[in-house]
Image (cartoon, rainbow, N blue to C red):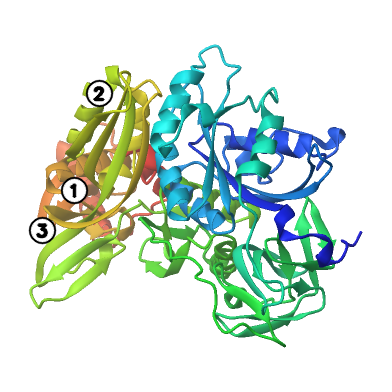
Amino acid sequence: MVDPPYNARPPVNIRNFCIIAHIDHGKSTLADRFLERTGAIADRDMRAQVLDTMDLERERGITIKAQTARLNYRAEDGTEYQLNLIDTPGHVDFTYEVSRSLEACEGAILLVDASQGVEAQTLANSYLAVEAGLEIIPVVNKIDLPAADVERASAELASVLGGDPADVLAISAKTGAGVDELLKAIIERLPEPQGDPAAPLRALIFDSYYDSFRGVVSHLRVFDGRLGTGDGVTFMATGQKGTADEIGVLTPTATPQASLGPGEVGYLISGVKDLGLVRVGDTVTSTARPASDALAGYAEPKPMVYSGLFPTEGDDFERLRDALEKLSLNDASLVYEPESSGALGFGFRCGFLGLLHMDIIRERLEREYDLDLVATAPSVAYRANTTKGEVVEIHSPKDLPQANLASIEEPYVAAMIITPQEYVGTVMELAQGRRGEQVSLDYLSPERVELRYRLPLAEVVFDFFDQLKSRSRGYASLDYEPHGYRVSNLAKVDVLLNNVAVDAFSAIVHKDKASDYGRTMVKRLRELIPRQMFDVPIQAAIGSRVIARETVKARRKDVTAKCYGGDITRKRKLLERQKEGKRRMKMVGQVEVPPEAFISALRVDTR
């Protein structure tokens, strides 16, 4: 079915908005109700989390990728409106997805759980929306819960936005209560998109993915001009030219259209097969009548955690390269470069926004591209200052220069923690135990406290969030952003097997915790490495100083079993010969480390 011509849809009847909130506050459920109330999806096709299309999203109950849908809404006066909805993730690792979605909208629904109130990501996302110049509709969700405190949540939300609690809408996305009033508020409160239909085409790509049959599929928002099927298009950042073979909208299924005009959100299939020629944040313009200036696009995301990904089968290296290339098109925050390891062979050093992001990427590679991978221990990006005045960025412990090293700097973050008042003490103890410096302590209400800390990123990315949830019984929330680098007392800990360093197990840690890390690794490896024909020493060392040691004892064959009686010297002679053989074997022998040992030893949750 082809859409009517563009002039039948004036921008005054279009609303572009996204749903932003802290994780698990009901964004995807509210999106389900919108789809249901506007008839975008048939009752027989309705299911929970309709817009969460990835298996991982449905299994984990979280949104990973921002998803779009066009909703056709008829107001009480009979006017037809086009609502372009973008459902966004809530986890701190996917803030970049949220920021991209905001650029394609004029308004945002800021959602808060009535039983939990304002959380860390609520504040972080509200700041993003304000900076993007969006009109915000504050909404309190889950009013059907027994523990719901609508008045308190409304007051907190109003204080964050500087508004009146009376303007805060109360809904239940689960039961549908208040959803109709929210749809009316979207029409009344949010501005219509601005754009000149007579100007040269300018459309912003805010997401894309690779289809093995049709090539690159780009999700875009048209700001100026008109995009029609069959038009010649140019991607301004790369200069790549193509043809709009198919354009359309997501309802939420892909529906072809004849054209897209100012303010509309849709998709473009241009026949481009080369993944490097289409970038998120690029501007699409008309080849026949190009625009002179590109749209602002997006700031490049800065990876915060690095880890090596290696195929367990060396022959899968090229498959891993192709998979990463396709996945990076869909996830612009993923960066990677080739890396080699003496223990693991050839792979890629990948940069991620956090540990959850790393876990999701690794699992997507294994599921969607049928790869079997080993991930090295995650590390943050350090800076090494040399005595020659050079500054070297370190993404992997093996890159740390051993000579002419003057100092090492580590990244810090500005962390915001919101917690009930009764858990303030235990949260402060946790933060200070991770070398945190307290900046402020403010009461949002008599029961809820906002703590701000400066923390080393390395102390945050591993298990800080889990510990925070554990110590606060799940009530505390966390958000953080980069806050520069500081010189720290750091050291590189090497793990040696049979006196040979294994680079996959090396780590840069604070010297106060180096001994603990070394003891943990050698104990774990002693249990994982199978016994050889000779004793295998496992050592953790800083430079030439050994800080921890364990030994995997050799298999022992009783060479004296056939000696019945006789002189004891005969037995000793056999034992000495065995001992000499083991010594020679140890000098030339290779310690075989099975892939399962790497996987188990490098598991993040056991650090």
Name the secondary structure under disc 2. helix
* Residue occupied by mark 2: 424
Residue 478 position (above or below residue 297): above
Mark 1 or mark 2: which is in front? 2
Q: Amino acid at mark 1?
A: Glu
* Circle 1 crowding by C-alpha within 10 Å: few under 14, some 14–19, many from 20: few
Mark 2 or mark 3: which is in front? 2
Name the secondary structure under disc 3. loop
**Horizontal side of residue 156 vs 283, given as left or right:** left
**Horizontal side of residue 576 vs 387, given as left or right:** right
- Where does the C terminus fall, quadrant-wise? top left
Q: Check residue 284 in the rendering and tell me which mark sits there, or answer none.
A: none
Q: Position of residue 256 (x, y in %)?
A: 83, 62
Residue ranking furthest to the right: 1
Q: Amino acid at mark 3?
A: Ser
Per the model, the C-alpha gap separating discs 1 and 2 is 65 Å
Residue 181 position (above or below residue 457): above
Q: Quadrant of residue 325?
A: bottom right
Q: Check residue 544 in the rendering and tell me which mark sits there, or answer none.
A: 3
Q: Residue at x 67, y 61 (%)?
A: 263
Q: Check residue 576 in the rendering and tell me which mark sits there, or answer none.
A: 1
State which tag comes first along the sequence, 1 or 2.
Answer: 2
Residue 296 position (above or below residue 465): below
Q: Residue at x 17, y 37 (%)?
A: 438
Residue 402 at least partly seen: no
- Where does the N terminus fall, quadrant-wise? bottom right
Per the model, the C-alpha gap separating discs 3 and 1 is 32 Å
**Horizontal side of residue 182 vs 4, given as left or right:** left
* Circle 2 crowding by C-alpha within 10 Å: few under 14, some 14–19, many from 20: many
State which tag comes first along the sequence, 2 or 3.
Answer: 2
Q: Position of residue 587 (x, y in %)?
A: 23, 61
Q: Position of residue 501 (x, y in %)?
A: 25, 59
